[in-house]
Image: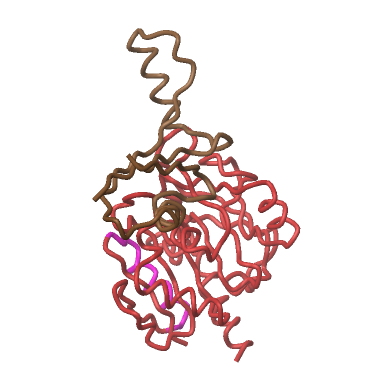
Chain colours: A brown, B red
Amino acid sequence: MAKVVVDVMPKPEILDPQGQAVAGALTRLGVSGVTDVRQGKHFVLEVDDTVDDETLERVAATLLANPVIEDWVVTRA
Amino acid sequence: MRIGVITFPGTLDDVDAARAVRYAGAEPVALWHADHDLKGVDAIIVPGGFSYGDYLRAGAIASIAPIMTEVVAAAGRGAPVLGICNGFQILCEAGLLPGALVRNAGLHFVCRDQRLRVESTATAWTGGLTVGQELLVPLKSGEGRYVADAATLEQLEAENRVVFRYAGGNPNGAVADIAGIASDDGRVVGLMPHPEHAIDPLTGPSNDGLGLFTSVLRATASAA
């Protein structure tokens, strides 16, 4: 068994209003200096030895992320 | 003519879609997400709602439901498919339409009667409408902002596949005011606003939406 982490983020050119709302809330909290926030998703998968890198890439590209709007990174922990 | 209306867990607007089909003079056929059976229908509607609770991304889980395998195959054979709101999101996630729907700019869930301008009548679902005609139909969505990359947008515009644009103000920040698009063969159409809620002035802001459902009757009659 191994742990695999998939991080999914909106592509840089995609407006992220949720991240903007978080950044705005930080200002109201009195935190200054945070100039931008972008919000993504963090998946943790438990996989057995039969799951190869190619399969993981397929999992990320076809389900966990939408390639039209999101980038992703697959990391074996 | 028989038109299938799919129900997923979390679908809300299947009943109104079936009612719109009846108003148009066709027979609605209930289709179930977990089946591989399209029951021999002539066209398919993927209605709105919050399929699978919008988990992961709106429409993402529904797009790989068993019934969607059959919808994708039927679309490949030229069957008319209409995706409304969550149905539009599902068709994009399933790869039947290009681009994606993301959270509204400004984050507000928008619920209002929305004016739409008809941009193309070269589809199975808009053949009975007129280019430039305006429709007043309800819009109710939190993730209705259409996005696509520059090349896709250029192609959609060049091929006359932008079917509806928002009129009187862009409610969600959709690129180029796009409210609805079509597949390259014009048989698959998706839009965020809800024509099925605007088929009778008794229950909606107009009966402007009925034209989509009567259009598909003509489209299949002429194809047959």
Q: Residue, x 33% and y 78% (percent of image)?
A: B30
What is the span of residues highlighted in magenta in the rendered image? Answer: B10-26
Magenta region includes residue B14: yes
Q: Position of residue B55 (x, y in %)?
A: 31, 50
Q: Position of residue B124 (x, y in %)?
A: 60, 74
Q: Nearer the viewer, residue A2 or B40?
A: A2
Specify the farthest residue to the bottom: B224
Q: Identify whether B126 is placed above or below A63.
A: below
Q: Quadrant of the C terminus of chain A?
A: top left
Q: How many marks?
A: 0
Magenta region includes residue A20: no
Specify the farthest residue to the right: B158
Q: Position of residue B157 (x, y in %)?
A: 72, 55
Q: Nearer the viewer, residue B27 or B179?
A: B179
Q: Position of residue B174 (x, y in %)?
A: 56, 44
Q: Quadrant of residue B47?
A: bottom left
- Residue B134 in the figure: left or right of residue A34: right
- Residue B163 in the figure: left or right of residue B201: right
Specify the principal SS of the magenta part: helix
Q: Residue, x 57% and y 75% (percent of image)?
A: B215
Q: Quadrant of residue B4?
A: bottom left
Q: Identify whether B107 is placed above or below B153.
A: above
Q: Nearer the viewer, residue A42 or A55?
A: A55
Q: Identify whether B8 is placed above or below A2.
A: below
Q: Identify whether B101 is placed above or below B88.
A: above
Q: Residue, x 49% and y 78% (percent of image)?
A: B73
Q: Residue, x 55% and y 66% (percent of image)?
A: B189
